[in-house]
Every structure is written in C-alpha cells, then in structure tokens.
Amino acid sequence: MMKNNLNVRQMQAYAAICLLIFCDHIRITNNAITELIKHLLAMSTAKSLPDWEQAGTGIAITGRGDPVPAEVDEAIPENYKATFNTLVECCVEVGIVDMYGASTEQPRLFLEKCIGIVQSLGLELPPIESLDKLAKGEDEWGEPVSEAELSNLVEGIGLKL
C-alpha cells in the first residue's frame, strides 16, 4: 500500500503522468490520447470539478467503458492493448470515483494500480513528492492551481505533451 499525502487533484495529475510515460514507452502518439492526458491534468486547474468531470464525457477517449477510437486501437501494439485500456480506466477513475459521494481510499487505490502498471514494465516514474509543488488546499480534493504552476510541474519533471 502506497502512503501519500496527496489530494485527489494531485493524484489525478500523477495518474496522467503515468499514462504519458506508458504511451511514450510504447511509442504511441495520437491527438485523442493527448486530449485525455490534458483533460486529466486539467483537474489540477479546474475551478468547478463537476464541470471538469462533465467535460471528460465529451472527449474521444473517456476511460469510462467506451471503446477507444479505431485509429488509437490500431496504433497500440497488440500485446499492450489490454494494459492500455486498464491503465486508461484506472487513470480516469482516480478523479471521478469519489466525485459525487463520500471521500474514500478508492482514488489512492486506482493510482496505485496506475503506478503498478507502469513499474511492471520497468519504467521510471518521477518522485511522487514532485506533486507537493502543487497547492494542497484544506480538504481531500485540494484547491485549483494556476496553469503556470501546472506547466512548471510538467516541465520540471521533464515531460512534454
């Protein structure tokens, strides 16, 4: 079990980082994947979490049981398709599982699955403490940060969208 003091926004950002690192590893790039990663990261800056959640239903890859677009599916090597789908669903669940109910351990557990998938491939993740740079806030969800703070975090750990 992973111990962290991250709020849900920070966990969502780290899950998005896991997906980005995985996609870089299997060398798939697609606008729909980039759109999903940007959406997941945008939770960090969202002033309205319900509006952010609703926006996620309108993107090409929702991670909510809908099939991925054919061009994305065709770009994923066969031996990574199931892993990709599981990782996408876990990444999305980090941010939405507790959206309309009580706060639980589920976001952390989904993040642990994301981390486990990436690490099972021998990939290196940035230190989870790097998320401490984002403002924490007073509750489990945290407060939104500025676009500049989010951009500095992503660039600071050496990632590019």
Image (cartoon, rainbow, N blue to C red):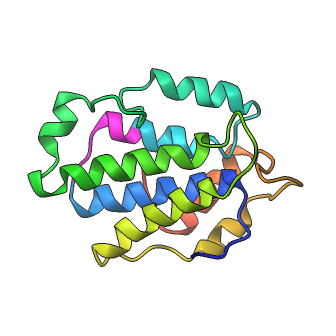
Instruction: Provide residue 73's location: percent of width, then percent of height.
Output: 18, 38
Q: Does residue 128 sit above or below 40 in this rendering?
A: below
Q: Residue at x 71, y 64 (%)?
A: 6
| Left or right: residue 85 compared with residue 72 | right
Q: Residue at x 81, y 47 (%)?
A: 143
Q: Does residue 69 sit above or below 27 in this rendering?
A: above
Q: Which residues are magenta?
A: 28-34
Q: Quadrant of residue 121?
A: bottom left
Q: Quadrant of residue 3?
A: bottom right
The mark total stands at 0
Q: Quadrant of residue 138?
A: bottom right
Q: Nearer the viewer, residue 103 or 142?
A: 103
* The magenta stretch spans residue 29: yes
Q: Residue at x 12, y 57 (%)?
A: 79
Q: Residue at x 34, y 34 (%)?
A: 32
Q: Does residue 138 sit above or below 157 in this rendering?
A: above
Instruction: Provide residue 65's location: percent of width, then percent of height.
Output: 36, 33
Instruction: Provide residue 113's location: percent of width, then percent of height.
Output: 45, 63
Q: Give the residue at the far right of this rendering.
A: 138
Instruction: Provide residue 56's location: percent of width, then percent of height.
Output: 52, 29
* The magenta stretch spans residue 4: no
Image quarter of the N terminus: bottom right
